[in-house]
Image (cartoon, helix red, strand yellow):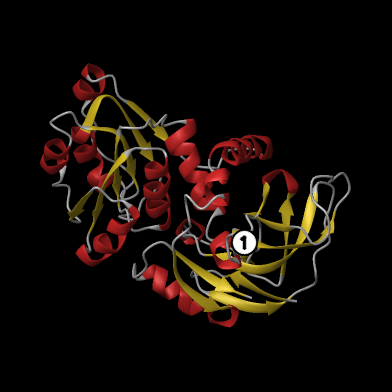
Amino acid sequence: MRAYYTVPGGSLEARDVALPEPGPGQLLVRIRAAGLNRGEFLGKIAAPKPAGTDAAGEVEKVGAGVTQFAKGARVMGRCHGGFAEYALMDARETMAAPKRLSWEEAAAAPIVFLVVYDMLVAQGRLQAGEWLLVTGISSGVGVAALQTAKALGAKVIGTSGSAEKLERLKPLGLDVALATRKPDFATAVMRATGDQGANLCVNNVGGSVFPEIVRCLAFEGRLAIVGYMDGVLKAEIDLDALHAKRLAIFGVSNKLRNAEQRARTVRGFSDSVLPLLADGRIRPLVDRVYPFNELPAAKARMDANQHVGKIVVKL
């Protein structure tokens, strides 16, 4: 079968590889579409590895012990080597793909919406009527955060270096659009929230805006650290503000989580967010769809930060 590998230097290489065989608890899935995720390509790549971390398709074969899915089932989820004609998924991290979603929309959902569930619901405890601030809101995670927050009844402020991208997000319910790439938005956030501040902030950008986000937080505000688009991994912290405002800062990452911990997030997501995708209250925003053999061009679009929402390849 055809598959893409990420090779040292960060480029993608097409290869012919053997069809994988599902082990216990696994599914072999015929991939129909797969989404691009920036995090997959960050850091040094020491050796070639299968590319693609989430996808959607049809179950081709089930491994021992799998009872919740059968051959032909329409599924989506996290996987290893999703940029391929077939890939393996852990049944514990696989979800039924809602019928109303196209293959491309289903492929755009798993990782970003699982991340959003983790930071907005499980850890962020976002409530209806609260204010959410999202930096770098035009990213896949940023757009999914906007859509989910609006479905939960929250109000959303978003920052982006592109006024054009912000305009594209207003029909999705963006309440306040701040066109900036600089840490200069605290005054505008406080003004928009009646000087109360944002109840929950999502930092997609990194250390360069961290101190400014702390200035934006309300009393008992929460701050989710999820991305480093600026490449800045360190920042000063105002301990007095952390102390006085009773702030909570948390990370959103799967790097050190085991399979059962990830599966617990999938179960929570399936209970609280998946129904919003199934009934149409949330529809993943697909920026552009590329043919499978144009995956390198799709990655180039992502690397150039030209997209709004998710870039997807179709098989």
The residue wearing badge 1 is 55
Q: Residue at the location (69% across, 56% down)?
A: 75
Q: Where 264 falls versus 162 (above or below)?
A: above
Residue 292, x across and y down, in percent: 59, 78
Count of residue discs: 1
Instruction: State which quarter of the image contains the N terminus.
Output: bottom right
* Residue farthest along the front direction in this orientation: 279
Residue 214, x across and y down, in percent: 23, 33
Instruction: State which quarter of the image contains the C terminus.
Output: bottom right
Sort mark 1 into few (<14), some (14-19) or many (20+) by Cα contacts within 10 Å.
Answer: many
Q: Residue at the location (68% across, 35% down)?
A: 260
Q: In the displayed structure, does residue 10 sit left or right of residue 154?
A: right
Q: What residue type is labelled 1?
A: Ala
Residue 208, x across and y down, in percent: 24, 47
What secondary structure is marked by label 1?
A: strand
- Given residues 164 and 275, the one toward you in this image is 275
Q: Quadrant of residue 48?
A: bottom right
* Residue farthest along the right direction in this orientation: 64
Q: Where 165 falls versus 227 (above or below)?
A: below
